[in-house]
Image (cartoon, rainbow, N blue to C red):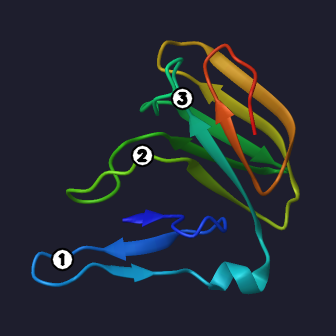
Amino acid sequence: MAFDFDHDGDQDIVIASTNAPAQLFLNRWADRIQNHWLKLRLLDGRGHEVPGVMVKVHTGKRVQAKTSSFSNGYLSSYVGPMLFGLGKATRVDLIEVLWPDGSSSHLENVRADEEIELRPNSPPTQ
């Protein structure tokens, strides 16, 4: 399973085996190249993670698109923020969010290296 275990903005990996202890591999490469990131936590009105949210992150000419999900590999699950790598960009031009109910959210000119909570029809929180 890949996720940001140490909250430094890069993907770390956990491998769980049936006949061996779990292994954690921390990604230290991103610490050396000093790239930026953005985390989005997509929540419903009760504060629960929402699957099926489509997100586009625009940074310059680059667009990243992801859909939130609770699955993360074979027989594993993960609930947590969506992580977007931004490279050398220090700001995100536009975040487009399409919620499963059909509503949408847009954020402009967002600082890099932030974790933002988004809820349908609500202002974002950091």
Which mark is first along the chain, 1 or 3?
A: 1
In 3D space, how far apart are the residues under numbered discs 2 and 1 (Cα atoms)? 20 Å
Q: What label does residue 17 carry, if any?
A: 1
Residue type at mark 3?
Leu
Instruction: Tell me if label 3 and label 2 are in contact, CB under 8 Å.
Output: no
In 3D space, how far apart are the residues under numbered discs 3 and 2 (Cα atoms)? 11 Å
Residue 20 versus residue 66: which sits nearer the camera? 20
Helix, strand or loop at mark 1: loop
Q: Position of residue 35 (x, y in %)?
A: 77, 71
Using the image, determine if residue 37 lies above or below residue 56.
below
Residue 82 versus residue 18: which sits nearer the camera? 18
Using the image, determine if residue 46 lies above or below residue 70.
above
Is 82 situated left or right of 105 in this image? left
Using the image, determine if residue 103 lies above or below residue 59.
above
Helix, strand or loop at mark 2: loop
Q: Residue at x 54, y 64 (%)?
A: 4
Q: Position of residue 14 (x, y in %)?
A: 37, 73
Helix, strand or loop at mark 3: loop
Which mark is first along the chain, 2 or 3?
A: 3
Residue type at mark 2?
Val
Question: Residue tagged by mark 3?
Answer: 43
Is 126 situated left or right of 18 in this image? right
Q: What label does residue 79 carry, if any?
A: 2
Q: Quadrant of residue 22?
A: bottom left
Which mark is first along the chain, 1 or 2?
A: 1
Residue 24 versus residue 74: which sits nearer the camera? 24
Give the position of the N terminus as an image quadrant.
Answer: bottom left
Residue type at mark 1?
Ser
Decide: few, some or many residues near mark 2? Use Cα within 10 Å; few <14, some 14-19, many ≥20.
Answer: some
Question: Which residue appears farthest toward the left when viewing the image?
Answer: 19
Q: What label does residue 66 carry, if any?
A: none
